[in-house]
Image (spheres, rainbow, N blue to C red):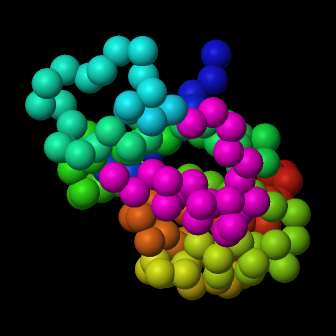
Amino acid sequence: MKAEPYLFFEGRCEEALQFYTKALGAKVGMVMKYKDAPEQPPEGMLAPGSENKIMHSEFHIGETRLFASDGGCTGGTKFEGFTLSLPVKTAAEVDTLFNALAEGGQVTMPLGQTFFSPRFGMVQDKFGVGWMVIVEQEMK
């Protein structure tokens, strides 16, 4: 068994997929728009005019599979109570990914050395998704 993140961007999913492709090298797989679904959502579940929004998508960041959707297309996202972690091998990788994610977002912990990593930082991207970017160290 494994847990895989499913992110609801409430109308900005296509923009988010493009952002993660550029910022993190994400690879987008399957994308289904509401208009292409074999069954349409119940009346009132979606904001009017949402037929071209993404009902379901799959993308990969490295070896991790994530799912994303426009959800109910309400325009307001709330990514609270969790943060996605990006462990990488070098400080240069941390800097590159952190700076890409910070574009249009908000730094919540500046990049720096910690007792658990030579390079670590936290950022909330422009969609409100929290990220921890870290040089992964072996625990002793």
Residue 72 quadrant: top left
User: How far across and down, in percent of the image, does residue 130 sit?
Assistant: 48, 62
> Visible in this render: residue 24?
yes
Name the residue at 21% across, 50% down.
Answer: 74
Q: Is residue 132 visible?
A: no
Who is closer to the viewer here, 111 or 93?
Answer: 93
- Above/below status of 61 relative to 36: below
Q: Nearer the viewer, residue 118 or 2?
A: 2
The x and y percentages for residue 3 are 57, 28
Residue at image coords 21%, 37%: 46
**Front-lying residue, 134 or 53:** 53
What residue is at 38 percent from the left and 31 percent from the top? 35
In the rendered image, the residue lying farthest to the left is: 44
Q: Quadrant of residue 1?
A: top right
In the image, residue 73 lies in the stretch drawn in magenta: no
Q: Position of residue 127 (x, y in %)?
A: 41, 64
In percent of width and height, residue 94 lies at: 75, 73
Point out the stretch of residues depicted in magenta. Answer: 11-31
